[in-house]
Image (tube, rainbow, N blue to C red):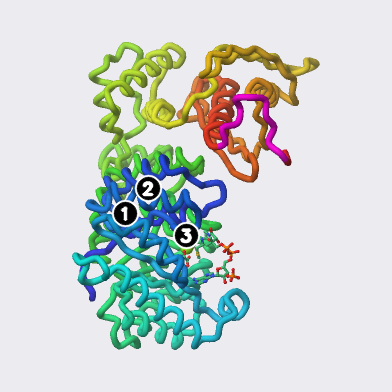
């Protein structure tokens, strides 16, 4: 089943969400799903329906909303109850897939599953058949779309792997996914695994071979590409390389490698690459997992040229130092383009060219933010505009709002914050707190007023663009009852950005738990 088309299977909402601190709620998942559909992913793994009611709900909603534009997939262990749950979430959507997995390596068989080889084969075959029968109960489905993954395949004895793959294809698997679950493989090794399956599984032509590579040794993308060279025709990947531990193969990297080196690979994907950058920004914003500046394809420096010799070359012919055009990945330069004298038309045009589609009222609000920022800041970069849009498109109910805040700090002074806030029920409260520094004082003061408290899990500040007057971006992660909530905000004043980011996270706690209306403390903090 070799063709020149590679199926892009996105698992940002399943494996990506398994990154510590990257949990998303249903609304956030729907927003990411919309962006993935616009990006053109072929298969969208929306979650693991048995894992929680929230995961079930998200898979069901995504399948119902987008099952006519992509194939929506749900994960299941080799257990009937998992497959039932996955099918319940998927059954009324148009294009769906059930993804069944069971570990096959000796380590997993012996220590985790405590199953002998025969039992692994029996269970995998039975459950692939069970999933196929479920799907075939729908009269319009003639060939059930079932994927089987022998988890930890890269550390599985090759002959046993062949046996499992052959028997699960016989049982009805239409895609066999070969995970390097712990990122142990190297490119040559992984190429050999896929080639061995092609050469030794008699019915391999009846299924698509897929790769699912983790990045523990930083080789996930290289291994996925090696898999393609050996005949794999589906790649499982995530936006920004999110995923368990060091993550999965980054979608933007595999797609752009295949496209840029089409001369070598001779294959294509259906990805609308100009959507890569906006999708990456969206996922970073929602998960709070920032992209490193020098990250390939979507990092802020991916198309920046600092060295004189490079700039000289670029000025004459871009291809001297650029192997991709920034606009092909949706990245639109970093030049100064707008200032405080710019009008709505130019602003709308810029926002659109940055890849955003905003409702008129949101655009108007962002424009007002832009004019205020232009008063404070000499030069407005595209990254500033992206920050403004991101801030206004985050969907968080603002139970509490900051009206005014004031901080004092410095040598020999006790850092203090005084904040006035309003609640949606009409209360207006002012309070003050001291802390180890002004940011700590602000956080404590916000907690006093809202009656919510949490443990600060992560706090990061970075500048969005260049210059002393650059906007600061603050991201916080707080831990309340063992669940992580993120907040993110921007301002040219990092203390103000910190206050808004922390409050955003507290508002999420209030949203999720109903707490914060009356004085309340999270236990165990
Ligand atoms: C490599 C991967 O990414 S696999 C996907 C990993 N993702 C996740 O685990 C996130 C979601 N997981 C969850 O919400 C939970 O782990 C659940 C709901 C799936 C299961 O929760 P629990 O019932 O509490 O079990 P727990 O997670 O502690 O242990 C896993 C159980 O599944 C079994 N198991 C693991 N993989 C499989 C499999 N593929 N098929 C069948 N059983 C399996 C384990 O042997 C263990 O069984 P036991 O409870 O009989 O000892
Ligand atoms: C569920 C499987 C495909 C997985 O995520 C892995 O093995 O890494
Ligand atoms: Mg995985």
Where, by quadrant of the figure, is residue 310 drawn? top left
> Can residue 260 be seen here?
no
Of residue 281 and residue 132, the one placed in the foreground of this image is 132
Where, by quadrant of the figure, is residue 208 drawn? bottom left
Instruction: Answer whether residue 514 is magenta in the image.
Output: yes
Instruction: Answer whether residue 52 is magenta in the image.
Output: no
Question: Residue 256, labelled with which disc?
Answer: 1
Q: Which residue is mark 3?
A: 50
Name the spot of residue 281 as percent of width and height, x first.
Answer: 40, 39
Name the spot of residue 297 as percent of width and height, x first.
Answer: 37, 47
Which residue occupies 68% across, 36% down?
Answer: 522
Residue 295 versus residue 223 in the image, above or below:
above
The Cα atoms of the two marked residues, 2 and 3, are separated by: 35 Å
**Residue stretch rendered in magenta on the structure:** 513-523
Q: Which residue is mark 2?
A: 297
Name the spot of residue 24 as percent of width and height, x first.
Answer: 47, 44
The Cα atoms of the two marked residues, 1 and 2, are separated by: 8 Å
> Can residue 206 be seen here?
yes
Q: Mark 2 near mark 3, Cβ–Cβ under 8 Å? A: no
- Secondary structure beneath dot 2 equals loop
Residue 121 versus residue 18 in the image, above or below:
below
């Amino acid at each position: 089943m070799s063709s020149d088309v590679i199926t892009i299977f996105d698992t940002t909402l399943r494996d990506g969400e398994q990154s510590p601190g990257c949990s998303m709620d249903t609304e956030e998942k729907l927003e990411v799903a919309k962006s993935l559909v616009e990006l053109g992913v072929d298969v969208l793994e929306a979650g693991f329906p048995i894992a929680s009611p929230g995961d079930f709900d998200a898979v069901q909603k995504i399948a119902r909303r987008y099952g006519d534009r992509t194939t929506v997939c749900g994960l299941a262990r080799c257990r009937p109850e998992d497959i039932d749950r996955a099918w319940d979430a998927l059954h009324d959507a148009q294009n769906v897939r059930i993804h069944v997995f069971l570990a096959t390596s000796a380590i997993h068989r012996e220590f985790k599953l405590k199953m002998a080889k025969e039992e692994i084969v029996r269970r995998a075959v039975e459950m692939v058949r069970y999933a196929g029968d479920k799907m075939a109960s729908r009269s319009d489905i003639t060939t059930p779309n079932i994927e089987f993954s022998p988890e930890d395949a890269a550390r599985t004895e090759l002959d046993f792997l062949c046996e499992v793959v052959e028997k699960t294809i016989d049982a009805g698997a239409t895609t066999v996914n070969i995970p390097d679950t712990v990122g142990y493989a190297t490119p040559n090794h992984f190429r050999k695994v896929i080639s061995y399956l092609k050469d030794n599984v008699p019915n391999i032509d009846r299924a698509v071979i897929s790769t699912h590579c983790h990045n523990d040794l930083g080789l996930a993308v290289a291994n996925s590409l090696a898999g393609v060279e050996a005949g794999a025709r589906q790649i499982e990947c995530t936006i920004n390389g999110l995923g368990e531990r060091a993550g999965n193969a980054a979608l933007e990297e595999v797609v752009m490698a295949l496209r840029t080196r089409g001369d070598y690979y001779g294959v294509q994907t259906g990805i609308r690459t100009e959507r890569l950058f906006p999708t990456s920004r969206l996922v970073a914003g929602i998960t709070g997992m920032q992209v490193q500046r020098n990250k390939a394809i979507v990092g802020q420096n991916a198309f920046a040229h600092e060295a004189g010799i490079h700039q000289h070359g670029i000025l004459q012919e871009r291809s001297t130092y650029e192997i991709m055009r920034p606009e092909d990945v949706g990245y639109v330069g970093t030049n100064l383009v707008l200032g405080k004298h710019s009008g709505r038309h130019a602003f709308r045009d810029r926002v659109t060219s940055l890849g955003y589609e905003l409702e008129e009222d949101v655009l108007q609000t962002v424009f007002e933010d832009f004019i205020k920022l232009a008063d404070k800041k000499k030069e407005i970069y595209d990254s500033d505009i992206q920050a403004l849009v991101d801030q206004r498109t985050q969907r968080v109910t603002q139970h509490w709002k900051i009206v005014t805040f004031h901080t004092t700090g410095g040598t020999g002074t006790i850092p203090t914050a005084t904040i006035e806030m309003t609640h949606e029920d009409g209360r207006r409260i002012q309070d003050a707190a001291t802390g180890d520094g002004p940011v700590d004082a602000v956080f404590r003061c916000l907690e006093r007023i809202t009656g919510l408290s949490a443990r600060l899990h992560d706090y990061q500040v970075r500048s969005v663009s260049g210059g002393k007057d650059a906007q600061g971006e603050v991201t916080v992660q707080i831990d309340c009852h063992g669940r992580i909530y993120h907040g993110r905000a921007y301002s040219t004043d990092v203390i103000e950005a910190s206050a808004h980011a922390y409050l955003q996270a507290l508002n999420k706690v209030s949203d999720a738990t109903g707490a914060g209306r009356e004085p309340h403390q999270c236990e165990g903090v």
